[in-house]
Amino acid sequence: MAAIARWCVRHRLVVVLLWLLALGGTAAGAVAAGSAYSNDYDVPGTESGRAATLLQEGFHGLGGDSDTVVWHTDDGSVRAPGVEERMTAMLDRVAGLDGVATVAGPYGDEGTGRISADGRTAYAVVTFDEQADDIPPAQVQALVDTARAAAGEDVQVELGGTAIAQSEAPGGHLAEAVGVAVAAVVLFLAFGSFAASLLPIATALVSVGTAYAGIVLLGHVMTVADFAPMLGLLIGLGVGIDYALFIVTRHRQGLKRGLPVADAAREATATTGRAVVFAGATVCIALLGMLILRLSFLNGVAVAASLTVVLTVAASVTLLPALLSFIGMRALGRRERRRLAEHGPRPELPTGFAARWSAFVERHPKLLGALAAAAMALLALPTLSLHLGTSDQGNGPATSTTRQAYDLLADGFGPGVNGPLTVVATLDGADDKVAMDGLSGTLRTTPGVAEASPVVYNGSGDTAFLTVVPETSPQSKATSELVDRLREDVLPAAGQGTSLQTHVGGVTAGYDDFASIIVGKLPLFIGVVITLGCLLLLLAFRSIGIPLKAAAMNVAAVASAFGVVVAIFQWGWGSELIGLGRAGPIEPFLPVIMVSVLFGLSMDYQVFLVSRMYEEWLETGDNRRAVRVGLAETSRVINSAAVIMISVFLAFVLSGDRVVAMFGIGLATAVALDAFVLRTLLVPALMHMLGGANWWLPRWMDRLLPRISIEKPGCRETARAKIPVQRTGGDESLVRQGGGGESAS
């Protein structure tokens, strides 16, 4: 690491130019190639997946995205001559728009069922030639403009559907700008130097910008969700600024000790840079753990987020040393430079609140540890009621046209019309057709079904489908129970004695299948992530207790963060107030992605805190001193880093995207609890109570494990001379002194 830093300092201009070239090159490639994101939740082998395949193969005209135009009148009826004439003319103009395949309106014989019972609400179905991800924004906007032009004082016109929702996605980068601005203020307050406060932001922006463009290109070679770039930005800005903050802090400490600029940059990279690389590796391992789920939708997210973290780490240990050498002594504030010139170099000892807090935790570990554990348990309670499902346009902001269209349809036709199910069947012979013809009547009498459409056959007569409208909303547990009942009881009974094979599909059924797959694999996924994280910490700190405590703390942080997410988004505590729509279920993929990210970010603070404790332990062999000094020297920078990361994450609530807001609030909560409760309170309290057992490792395991080092070079050699050896039962083993011993200071 020192060699890398030395080279980057000596060739600083080359390093900066190479990074700018990487940023410009990937950005140009992304602009030229364009985006190719996909939100394909279909899982091969599931029943909804088979239904979608059969429908696509048997009915080629149904492959495009279907959206709705809804109109409502408070006075009179939508059948009034003036309203019907105006809406029919509007639908004729819509049918002539580019990209529109068909328009099915409510007027005429084919429109039966598209006018509400009270006659005040009607809707038309507009089917595009392409799926929503492939429809040009201009075509969607043309539909919106044409439909809304028909609105008047007596008629309200709203639009719903996937393509319409994408057109409502907020543009610009307000969230990122707010997060970066807050980070800049915190950095300036922490450093007192304008130049030093800009470097972490510059490093993060270059690396995250390169990663963002790379994710756009990645979408052309694998399935990448449309929220993956925003998630990458969220993670990259948070960890990128934090990693650079830690290195700049160490660099400034070196300057205050009188080191030349080049030597200070090299030492900061050789010491804190090791922890940065290690922390970044833990984040990537946690993210790439999603690959074991073998879901293409999540594979792209995992690779995209990992790419962002890799580039932020690389920029922190290459670009940042080069920039530090450019600004020279301006990494210190004017007052600090003047004090250094007048009084010479002095060691920077932990003082103030950090030192007092560290001593306070040392004196009251049991009480403080119990209070911290109780607070985490209380926040985690809502997690017990976690309901996985898919939020839809009914969860959008009340002012959006998609939300208003959703509400108008639900009020006029029942909540189930917003999430119809599709029953698709393959037929082989006359008996199958007879059974299929009778299926509509059977379904209409099934509890939980509001309506079932007539059967539609394809040209060859070997595939048929019908639409089932549930009585309950797409997000309701009752709708999921209906899907199970249809699959397990109703449809098999209807096809008994025939070869009729039926499959229940549709958006709601697809989401249920996707959630079931994830829930089934979640224990394996969490186990793998915890095991790999513990193994890395075991190799780094040569201790069994440190990894086990880290795993427990990470689980606590994840559970508490999910508790807050459930309270806000599922229970609706303030979700409308902050512009995130009404309460609804938690996205099925959210637990997997958040567990990955949260485990990785939790490991970051664990590494930075415990690595300093370990460094002190290796030098003194005194556990109490190691914990006290480690907490006192790192708590201030960890808290500053946490404030920055929390600000960046919370700023993404301004994106207006419900899924991104879930990530932002969940990650911000986890970081806040991790930094201010776990790492500065519960972890040191437990380490004080465990004493020298924190650093215990069986001698046979110590011999077998490979050695990796994240502490200051030379610490292990110093430790061998300072930590005494005790013979037990004829075997020589290291007995770590400390715990109840006196401080070596």
Image: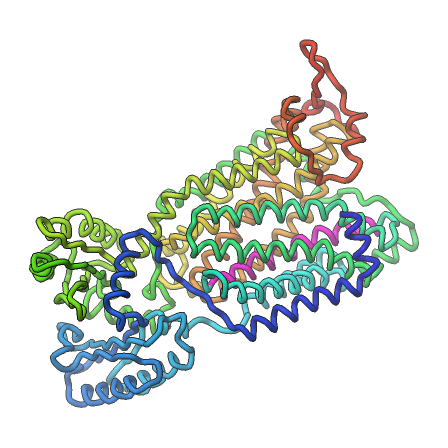
Quarter residue 86 falls in: bottom left
Against 206, residue 354 (above or below) is: above
The quadrant of the rendering that contains the C terminus is: top right
Of residues 230 and 139, the one nearer the viewer is 139
Q: Is residue 284 left or right of residue 300?
A: right
Q: Is residue 520 left or right of residue 550?
A: left
Residue 606 screen position, x and y as percent: 62, 41
Residue at 28 percent across and 84 percent down: it is 95
Q: Which residues are magenta?
A: 227-255
Q: Is residue 648 left or right of residue 335?
A: left
Residue at 66 percent across and 41 percent down: it is 609
Residue 213 screen position, x and y as percent: 58, 67
Against 620, residue 128 (above or below) is: below
Give the colour scheme shown: rainbow
Of residues 271 and 174, the one nearer the viewer is 271
Of residues 464 and 22, the one nearer the viewer is 464
Residue 356 visible to an observer of this rendering: no
Residue 621 screen position, x and y as percent: 74, 27
Q: Is residue 247 left or right of residue 6?
A: left
Q: Is 245 included in the stretch rendered in magenta?
A: yes
Predominant secondary structure, magenta span: helix
Q: Is 450 included in the stretch rendered in magenta?
A: no
Residue 371 visible to an observer of this rendering: yes
Q: Residue furthest top?
A: 729
Against 652, residue 383 (above or below) is: above
Q: How many marks?
A: 0
Residue 240 screen position, x and y as percent: 64, 56
Quarter residue 20 falls in: bottom right
Residue at 22 percent across and 55 percent down: it is 503
Residue at 44 percent across and 71 percent down: it is 169
